Image: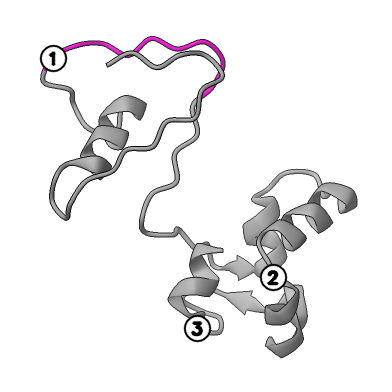
Amino acid sequence: MKLNKGSLTMIIGGVGSGKSSLGAAIIGDIERQSGEVKYIGSIAYCPQTPWINNNTVQGNITFGNIYDEQKYNEIIHVCALEPDFQILPAGDQTAIGEKGVNLSGGQKAR
């Protein structure tokens, strides 16, 4: 499979057809049976299961990086988190994860 630079490629298939396995093989999460992956720049991969750290919502978004208010607000807007912050007990400072409040599947994914 060859993907052209700057193109948007979607992998579409039925349940169990290997879409997630292909993505995992591309980024090296699982061993490829054959072939090689060559790329220029970077690859982004969003797994099906969100990984939530025992931290605040803000801590899960910034993930140890220096807080940049403009970038943070852009992420909040793009992920449509404003309504969630209104219902969480401490907004974006609410603790989530095993020791915090439970989030819905949609909230975790966003």
Q: Is residue 82 left or right of residue 99?
A: right
* Residue 76 appears in the picture as rendered: yes
Q: Point out the tag, 3 or 2, that comes first from the N-terminus.
A: 2
The mark found on residue 81 in the picture is 2
Q: Is residue 36 above or below residue 82?
A: above
Percent of width and height locating residue 101: 55, 84
Residue 102 disc label: 3
* Residue 40 is a magenta residue: yes
Q: Which residue does the image show at 32% across and 26% down from the upper left? A: 26
Magenta-colored segment: predominant secondary structure? loop
- The residue that mark 1 highlights is 34
Considering the numbered disc 1 on the image, is that residue within a helix, a strand or a loop? loop
Compare residues 4 and 108 and report the one nearer the observer.
4
Question: Under tag 2, what secondary structure?
Answer: loop
Horizontal side of residue 99 vs 62, given as left or right: left
For marks 1 and 3, give the CA distance. Answer: 41 Å
Q: Residue at x 70, y 89 (%)?
A: 87
Residues drawn in magenta: 34-42
**Which quadrant is home to the C terminus?**
bottom right
The residue under the point 50% across, 34% down is 44
Q: Amino acid at mark 1?
A: Ser
